[in-house]
Amino acid sequence: MSAAEGLSPTFALSGLDPLTAVRRRTAEAPRASAALVSRQQWERRFRMRLRASDTAVVALSCAFATAVSLGTVAPTGIDTIPVSAGAIAAATATLWFAALVLFNTRSTSVVGMGAAEYARVAHATGLAFGMLAILFVVFEWEGIRTQLFTALPLGTVALIASRWGWRRWLVAQRADGGYASRTVVVGSRDDVEYAIRALGPAGQLGYLVVGTAILEDADDAADAESVRTRNEEAVLRAASVHESDTIVVASQPAGDPSYIKRLAWALEGTAAELVISSRLADVAGPRMTLRPVEGMPLIHVKIPSFEGAAYYVKRALDIAASAAALLVFAPVAAIIAVAIKLDDGGPVFFRQARVGRDGREFAMLKFRTMRVDAETELAALLAANEGAGPLFKLKRDPRVTRVGQRLRTFSLDEVPQFWNVLRGDMSVVGPRPPLPAEVTAYDGTVLRRLYIKPGITGPWQVGGRSDLTWEESVRLDLRYVENWTVMTDLVLMWRTLKVMVTPEGAY
C-alpha cells in the first residue's frame, strides 16, 4: 500500500489538497487548526490545575511555618511580630512562586514525565530557599529560620506528592484517550514500527498514535521530485484525516536532506510539534543535549562515567536508607525469624554468593525461604526451569517453605540485604545481583551490568520481576546502568513500595 492510499485529500481548513493549500498560503500567516486549538486548550487547563495546587501547597506551607514562628519566637513587640512574620511569609511565597515559574515546572515538556518533573520542582524549591538563606544571613530575620526548617521540607514533599497525584490523574485520563497528543508517525516501515513500540500503549506516555505515513525513497534522480511531493502530501493528509497535533518523524527519505525543514513549514498551523525520533537506543535525557552550530543541530551524547561526585551522593543515600530500613524493619524481622524457626527448625538466614561491582563476589544475606537441603535438589529440577536466559526460576518451586512463599510474595525475604547495602556490597537501587554461574554465561554487553553495585530493587523489580524475558531484564538493567540519577533512584524506591503491596511476578 502506498503512503497516501486510503487517506482522504480533504484539508482541515481550506478544503483543498493539503500541499496545494500550503503553497497557496505562502503570503498569509498560518491559522491554527481545530486539532491544534484542542491541544492548546487541554494543555492550558492542566497548567491551571497545576498552578492552583502549587499555590495551595506554597501558601499552606508558608502559613504553617508562620504559625510555628509566632508560637516559638519570644515577642519583642506585640505589634511588630505579626507584621514581620507576615512579610517574611509573603517574601518566601513570592520567591517560591517565581522559582517555580523560572524553572518551567509547569511546562508541557516535563509535566507527567515523572523524575524529570520532580527534579525541576526540587531544584526550583532549592533555589528559592537558597535565596531565602542569603536574606537570613544578611538581615538575621528570625522568622526566616522557621521558613527554612519548616516550610522547605514540608513544602518540597507536598509539592512532589501533589505532582505525583496529578501525574496519576493524567495517566488515567490518557488511558481513556484524553490529555494526550494525537500523533502521526512517519518514516520507513521498520522505523515507524520501532517508534510506535517505544511510544507505548494507549497514550500513557503522552503520545496517542492515531495514524502512520510510510515514506517512499526515490529510485533515481528523475523520480526524486515526484516522490518528495507524494511524501509531503501523505503526511499532511494523515495529519488532517486523523486530526493530529503531533508528527513524529521516525526516519526521513533517503537522498532528501531538506525533508524535515520543508515538512515543518508545511505543518505550520496544522500541528503543534514535529518530533524527531532517534534510534540512540536506551540513551536517556540526562546524557543528551542539543547544541545548534551554524544552524545545524548537534545532539551531544555524554559518554557514561562510573565514578565521581554522583556516586558519593548515591553512597550517602544508600547509607541513610539502609540504616533507616534496618531500624524500621527490626520488629518485623524478629517476627519473621521466629516464624522461619517454628516452620522447620532450620537457620533463619540464607547466605549465597553473588557477583557485585567489577566482578567481585560477596555473600548476599536473605531470610531463608527454601528447605535446608534445597541446593542439593536443584539438579533434579533443572529440566523444569521456567526462568529466562541463564536464570533458574519455578513458579511453584517445591523447595519453598510455607513461610517462605509469603515472604517472597511481598519481597520481605530481601530485607536482610539492607545489611549488604550498609556494608557497601550492594546499593538500594541497581541491577539485579547475579549468581556466579550466571556471570559465566554473560557476553561483553551484559557484563556492563557489573559496572555499578547491584541493588535490592531496580527497574527489573518494578517492571515485572520474574515475568520479564531475559532480553527485557538485560535491557532494563543496562539502561539503568548508563542513565541513572539520584532522582531516578528515589522514584524507583517509591515504585518498589507499590510493587510490594500489589506483587506481580514474585515467585
Image: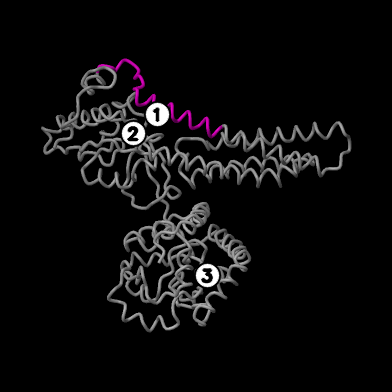
Looking at numbered disc 2 in the image, what kind of residue is underneath it? Arg
Which of these two is toward me, 145 or 251? 145
- The span picked out in magenta is 24-51
The residue indicated by pointer 1 is 39
Question: Image quadrant of residue 468?
Answer: bottom left
- Per the image, the residue denoted by label 3 is 417
Q: Is residue 136 above or below residue 468?
A: above
**Of the residues shown, which amino acid type is indicated by label 3?**
Gln
Please indicate whether residue 9 sits to the left or right of residue 310 in the image.
left
Quadrant containing the N terminus in the rendered view: top left
Q: Secondary structure at mark 1?
A: helix
For label 3, the crowd category at 10 Å Cα-Cα, with few meaning under 14, some 14 to 19 and many 20 or more, is many
In the image, is residue 367 part of the stretch drawn in magenta?
no
Cα gap from disc 3 to disc 1, whole angstroms: 48 Å
Residue that badge 2 annotates: 182
Query: Separation of disc 3 and disc 2 at Cα?
Result: 45 Å
Colouring convention used in this rendered image of the protein: one colour
Give the percent coordinates (x, y) of residue 408: 46, 67
Mark 1 is surrounded, within 10 Å at the Cα level, by few (under 14), some (14 to 19) or many (20 or more) other residues, namely: many
Question: What secondary structure do most residues of the magenta stretch adopt?
Answer: helix
Q: Could you say where residue 417 lies in the image, as x and y percent from the top left?
A: 52, 70
Residue 204 appears in the figure: yes
Disc 1 marks which amino acid? Arg
Give me the C-alpha separation between circle 2 and circle 1.
Answer: 9 Å
